[in-house]
């Protein structure tokens, strides 16, 4: 498995991760991914798959880098802490390797949310902090609220068929040491169909 640095943290992680959105409790699929050396597993409290990820890695937790996300309706300080505790229990682990803000929120100040993330890191319950679906301005605000260099990832929709948002975000992340985590890079399984419809796309791969 090819490895890469996580943000500017110095930690090496697998370049290809395995997402568990829409798994609907499919433990066998997660176990198959782990058997194929998918050592980076991404989930979220809203996916309802954390328990299955935890069951899949049970007994060999240290071999895997576990990432999960807190939902925007839980961005108040106490709610972030409580959500993290639930995720820790669901994952069956003492620490979350990467804890991410799932979407930006206009209802809770980013300083309050990042204050909770800082506490989780200080308490040893979270190792790294990331965000998801954040624009350049939102990411800049998040970094300022948390501390320069502490936001290690921004997970965004990014594929050859859908990259307008990424075209703006990727250069900023590259310049500031933030790793881009791409979700739906194969367009949820429709990529091969679209290649047949637009064969010139294949020449860009």
Image (tube, rainbow, N blue to C red):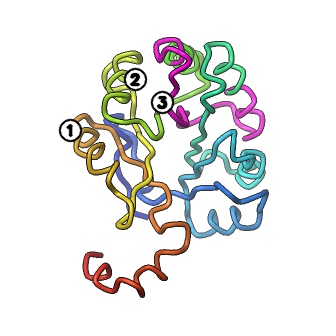
As drawn, is 173 to the left or to the right of 43? Answer: left
Per the rendered image, the range of residues in magenta is 84-113
Residue 129: give its label: 3
Q: Earlier in the sequence, mark 1 or mark 2?
A: 2
Q: Nearer the viewer, residue 80 or 121?
A: 80
Say which quarter of the image contains residue 125. Answer: top right
Q: Work out which quarter of the rendered image holds the C terminus and state it.
A: bottom left
Q: Residues within 10 Å of mark 1 (few under 14, many from 20)?
A: few
How far apart are the alpha carbons under marks 3 and 2?
10 Å
Mark 3 lies on a secondary structure that is: strand
| Residue 41, image x, y percentages | 58, 52
Q: From this view, report whether residue 18 is shown above or below residue 78.
A: below
Q: Nearer the viewer, residue 177 or 57?
A: 177
Mark 2 lies on a secondary structure that is: helix
How far apart are the alpha carbons under marks 3 and 1?
18 Å
Residue at 72%, 45% in the rendered image: 50
The residue indicated by pointer 1 is 175
As drawn, is 22 to the left or to the right of 113? Answer: right
As drawn, is 129 to the left or to the right of 18? Answer: left
The residue indicated by pointer 2 is 142
Q: Residues within 10 Å of mark 3 (few under 14, many from 20)?
A: many
Q: Is residue 130 magenta?
A: no
| Residue 124, image x, y percentages | 58, 22
Mark 1 lies on a secondary structure that is: helix
| Residue 98, image x, y percentages | 53, 37
Residue at 39%, 56% in the rendered image: 158
Q: Earlier in the sequence, mark 3 or mark 2?
A: 3
Q: From this view, report whether residue 109 is shown above or below residue 14.
A: above
Select label 1 or label 2 by which is in front.
2
Say which quarter of the image contains residue 123. Answer: top right
Label pair 3/2, CB-CB below 8 angstroms: no
């Amino acid at each position: 498995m090819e490895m890469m640095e996580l943000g500017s943290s110095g930690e090496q992680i697998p370049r290809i991760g395995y997402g568990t959105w829409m798994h609907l409790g499919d433990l066998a699929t997660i176990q198959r991914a782990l058997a194929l050396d998918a050592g980076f597993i991404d989930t979220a409290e809203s996916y309802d798959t954390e328990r299955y990820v935890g069951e899949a890695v049970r007994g060999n937790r240290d071999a895997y880098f576990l990432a999960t996300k807190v939902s925007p309706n839980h961005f108040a300080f106490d709610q972030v802490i409580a959500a993290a505790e639930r995720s820790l229990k669901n994952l069956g682990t003492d620490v979350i390797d990467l804890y991410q803000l799932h979407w930006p929120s206009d209802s809770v100040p980013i300083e309050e949310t990042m204050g909770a993330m800082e506490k989780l890191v200080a308490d040893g319950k979270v190792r790294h902090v990331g965000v998801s679906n954040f624009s350049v301005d939102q990411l800049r605000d998040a970094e300022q609220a948390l501390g320069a260099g502490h936001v290690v990832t921004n997970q965004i929709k990014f594929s050859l068929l859908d990259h307008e948002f990424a075209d703006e975000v990727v250069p900023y992340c590259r310049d500031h040491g933030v790793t881009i985590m791409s979700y739906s890079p194969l367009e949820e399984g429709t990529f091969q169909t679209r290649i047949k419809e637009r064969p010139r796309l294949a020449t860009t791969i």
